Image (tube, helix red, strand yellow):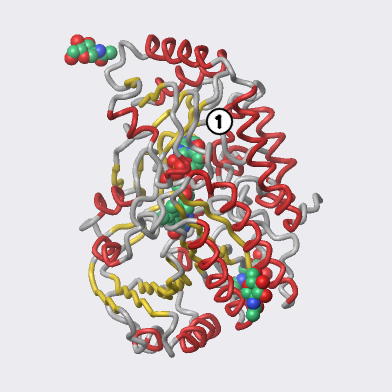
Amino acid sequence: MVRVTPFVSAALLSLAAIEVVIAKSQKHFKDLSGFQDTCTQIAEAIRFSNDSALYYSPSSQYHLDNAHWSESSTAQSACSVEPGTPQDVGKILRIIGVTRTPFAVKGGGHATNPGFSSTIGVQISMTRFNKVIVKREASTVEVGAGLTWDDVYQALDGTGLNVVGGRVSGVGVAGFTLGGGYSWKTNQYGLTIDNVESYELVLPDGTIQIVTSQNEDLWFGLRGGFNNFGIVTKFVLKAHPQGDVWGGLVIISSSSRHVHKVKAAILKFQQEVTDPKAMLLPTYNSVRNIPSIEVLMFYDGPEKPAGIFDDFLTMVEIRVIETSASFLEFLKILPSSDPFAGKRAYFSTVSVLQYSAPLLDVLANETLFWGKKLSKLDSRGAVSYDMEPFDPGLFNHSNIPSAYPPDRSRALFPTNIYFAWSSPSKDADVATALWQSTNTIRAAAIAQGQNIDDVAVYGNYALIGTPVESLYGANLPRLRSIQNRVDPHKVMALAGGFKF
Ligand SMILES: Cc1cc2nc3c(=O)[nH]c(=O)nc-3n(C[C@H](O)[C@H](O)[C@H](O)COP(=O)(O)OP(=O)(O)OC[C@H]3O[C@@H](n4cnc5c(N)ncnc54)[C@H](O)[C@@H]3O)c2cc1C
Ligand SMILES: *[C@@H]1O[C@H](CO)[C@@H](O)[C@H](O)[C@H]1NC(C)=O
Ligand SMILES: *[C@@H]1O[C@H](CO)[C@@H](O)[C@H](O)[C@H]1NC(C)=O
Ligand SMILES: *[C@@H]1O[C@H](CO)[C@@H](O)[C@H](O)[C@H]1NC(C)=O
């Protein structure tokens, strides 16, 4: 058994780690003209393919291919390439492997860690893998790796079917699914990785493989292992029946007398609600030092369920929206997922066993404290703390081991911390602040008796510099040995991300 490295030391590690990651990628690859040569080779290799294309600055395609949800995640690549077939992805990977060129693979571009899906080398944008194919007899939906969940839900609208996917608009299918995937449907069906039937994978040597549960090693690795095993071009997802849903959004001013009621209502939801169709996503925000609380409610049925959400809905403070509509319509009532205030953004996370009253107090205090600090640091500074009280059985929908979560025996709730700002010169300060808040929350939960010393954190929320031990725990040795076999020449190490 590998003991997980304590997370607390990460505060010291963090900034150094970010600098090392960036310095490494630049020191090893100083020869920028070499990247141009790789671009030329790729252009040549796909010249006769009508499915793929390569772009340079300042074309608009080049900018779209490099663009990210968070500006701090965008880099200027030497060129961008949009492969349209798995064969062309294979050709590109072979050239990258031989020339040892740094590269990035981008699905929906929602990674908040710099360099995870961006690069100064070759930017691969998966945008041309854009098909949604419903296989009604098989109860599956085939989804291209370049799509966002919006595209998928749009295509499924009216079919009576749905998949276990993203919760707010804009998020990409690929990174979400390769990291785990916490969905509105997770209480009913598990994580998105628990609802994959197969992957179409281009291996680091350029060959194409359909990976199913028959291939124990890659199946294990791809379920949480991100881009470490190659480039996925297509996901086949389980289809579930979908009727109309009920949804609600309440925004409450933090100065309001209702704040303590929100806390009581969150605790009550967590303690009493066992209906897996009901989901709650409360968030403490502070945008330019103006605090507020936002509570999203979801019910996978056409009517508002009796009793479950009433405590929130009677707290009308700023705004209440309720809807009974199709799943697609429901998503439209959700707040815009644009980075608020500042357009730069980092995520961080603490996995907790429960949201207790004292922990909610800590989260509320952190929101006010860092909301104020960030607004002083940057005029567009903002912070957001998401509580994610899933059903305690959320990991029990699969009993096949997966890279993430390394231990399914205990439920973990992935608290999401999100800091936004606008000035590039403040990147390092924000990262430091985010680590401090992360460690404060973690330490508080431990001091309050939560045994989370060595539990895994969710890779799609974890801040760059988080030790991989914290993501994969005791799974690391197996993941490393699979990777050594699948990628002996370490081609995927040329792409950023959490590396084993
Ligand atoms: C507004 C917002 C809301 C979110 N909501 C949720 C939520 O409700 N639940 C949840 O679980 N997460 C959520 N997330 C986190 C989200 O899961 C991650 O940001 C995820 O990585 C996004 O996927 P992407 O394809 O857009 O990202 P990208 O930035 O394109 O990719 C992320 C990582 O995956 C790799 N990758 C991308 N495509 C491929 C591919 N085809 N083959 C191999 N590797 C690939 C990239 O190299 C990169 O390392 C949210 C994020 C944001 C910004
Ligand atoms: C690409 O398109 C051109 C023009 O439509 C056609 O002549 C050519 O055969 C196509 N090439 C391939 C590989 O399909
Ligand atoms: C609020 O949080 C800050 C920063 O973590 C901390 O210094 C302060 O002691 C906290 N206040 C209370 C009342 O807990
Ligand atoms: C989930 O499964 C684990 C065993 O892996 C078990 O200990 C736990 O009680 C289950 N939780 C629920 C809520 O069913």
- Numbered disc 1: secondary structure: loop
Q: Position of residue 310 (x, y in %)?
A: 37, 88
> Which residue appears at 25% of the width and 74% of the height?
323
* Residue 348, picture quadrant: bottom right
From this view, report whether residue 1 is shown above or below residue 143.
Answer: below
Q: Which residue is mark 1?
A: 495
How many circles with numbers are drawn on the protein?
Answer: 1
- Relative depth, front residue between 193 and 106: 106
**Mark 1 residue's CB less than 8 Å from ligand 1:** yes
Whether residue 196 can be seen here: no
Whether residue 29 can be seen here: yes
* Residue 84, picture quadrant: top left
Q: Amino acid at mark 1?
A: Ala
Q: Is residue 264 left or right of residue 235?
A: right
* Residue 76, picture quadrant: top left
- Relative depth, front residue between 274 and 121: 121
> Which residue appears at 39% of the width and 43% of the height?
108
Q: Position of residue 292 (x, y in %)?
A: 42, 75
> Which residue appears at 31% of the width and 81% of the height?
304
